[in-house]
Amino acid sequence: MKTIRTAVVAAVAALAVARCGVAANAHMQNARNSPEWFTRGVMYQIQIRSFTPEGTLAAAAERLRYLRDLGVTIAYLVPVMKMDDDMDRRFWSPRQIKSGFDNPRNQYRIADYFHVDPEYGTDQDLRDFCDRAHGLGLKVVFDLVYLHCGPTAPFLKEHPDFTWWNEDGTVKPGPWTFPKLNFANPKLREYLVGNMKYLVGRYGADGFRCDVGDGIPLDFWCDAHDAIDALPGAGRVLLCEGFTVCDQYKGFDADYGWFPGLDARTVRGAWADREAKCPVGSRFVNHYENHDIATDLRPRREKAWGRDAIDQVLVWMFTIDGVPMLFSGNELADADERHSMFGRTPMDWSQLEREPGRGRHALVKRLAEIRRGIPAFTDLNGAEGLSWLDTTAAGSVTAFVRRESPGKDGGSGGAVGRAAVIVVQNWTTNAVSCEVSFKVPPPKLASYLAADRTDRDVKGAISAAPVYAKDARFASPAGFELGPWGCWISRIEPPSAPAAGAVR
């Protein structure tokens, strides 16, 4: 569901501060530690209804090897638990009605949090899916829908105090006209945490994407993370579909990182604004399309933005701080406008055999290889791992440096003696020539704070041999000629030992 900012978060802010260790200035503290399988991962959102012609978990399991070979490491399933099939349209979302499928079964209107919907298969099919994924080295993230439920969910009869009711005995509709769950009730919290523990124990869930996570009290997610961390095994994560400045202290491992738009100043400015508000090292799952966007936006972004622009966004997703997330069909340049989360609209897999699908698939696979092979892209989050660089074409071109952790082999091309990689991108349809400054602007801090004196300037020289380049040419000493949507990725060679061919 689309992210909302509800009064619930504000109402529990004081409690969240006490329980999650939130400081008044979020950027003064560090975000929680998260497992490397997540921070170094590549996520793929599987929309079961469209991912295969059959639309089942069993069929999706047969495609897991394809995802592994593409470079995906995390399979994220949209909700597959039993949906409410109530035909009363008063409790259908406006989007659901508008879709025209006349289908009461909404993936985000759950009736039973513990069992698989028959449309997708059986409980055993989900267990088999997870076992197959784990056997291939993939992690599995489930989708939790805890803000609301279906109006005829059986547990509401057993626990009527889990929601609110009208005087006439009918359930009171909340956001999207679904019954909203009552997180002031400790028994509801215990029930939902029990559900998470069950999904880990029964199916082997490695983590959860939390639908409208910022609409649910943060202290619930803090307690929930503690509960799943205490289970046998280790390294589970919670991903918030939403964003609050303090949620990565303890409750969440990452927030959603929607792509801000095809404008160089916006790409950089939105990132800087968000980073200034968040705990140090906060993480974001970066994407340009998901089940909501693919359902609601027409034309779809593949058509609206065009192939070259989407390719540029993918380069950004795989090299910027955070975790890249692909939506079903992004790797095939899928632009089918029949797609809807509210009904069966299978992807056309023959797109793999022709352009632009063939070229897009090759690009995604290459970017996944680059991300996997260069530690600088996944070692560090925050200012120590990412520095934006000024360019002489700030309205058209962005540039940033990613740095490895200190003490690694491979040179000292970055600040503080760390190997580094530079990424330069033209966000326009025009050819651009520009210079990139190696001086890193200091972060903006409140006037009452001591200045950050860390030297993050780039030390060394840009290698003339790119790791990846598209319609781009490098010129000495830090100049670039970039064609429309051109980009350049290369290592920074250390000043003491420049590589052959490096331009200094």
Image: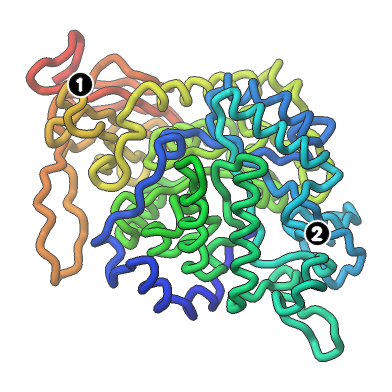
The quarter of the picture where residue 469 lies is top left
The nearer-to-camera label among 1 and 2 is: 1
Taking the image as shown, residue 124 lies to the left or right of residue 316, namely right
Quadrant occupied by the C terminus: top left
Give the residue pinned by disc 2. 96
Helix, strand, or loop for circle 1?
Answer: loop
Which residue sits at x=37%, y=41%? 321
Q: Distance between the residues labelled 1 and 2?
A: 54 Å
What x and y, as percent, mark residue 119?
A: 85, 43
| Residue 446 in the image: above or below residue 331 | below
The quarter of the picture where residue 212 lies is bottom right
> Does residue 261 appear in the picture of this structure?
no
Q: Which of marks 1 and 2 is nearer the N terminus?
A: 2
| Residue 73 in the image: above or below residue 211 | above
Q: Nearer the viewer, residue 25 or 469?
A: 25
What x and y, as percent, mark residue 27?
A: 27, 60
Graded by Cα atoms within 10 Å as few (under 14), some (14 to 19) or many (20 or more), the crowding at tag 1 reads few
Which residue sits at x=38%, y=39%? 320
Give the residue pinned by disc 1. 409
Quadrant occupied by the N terminus: bottom right
| Residue 156 in the image: above or below residue 248 | below
Amino acid under label 2? Gln
Helix, strand, or loop for circle 2?
Answer: helix
> Does residue 455 appear in the picture of this structure?
yes
Taking the image as shown, residue 224 lies to the left or right of residue 17, namely right
Q: Nearer the viewer, residue 45 or 158?
A: 158
Which residue sits at x=47%, y=34%? 41
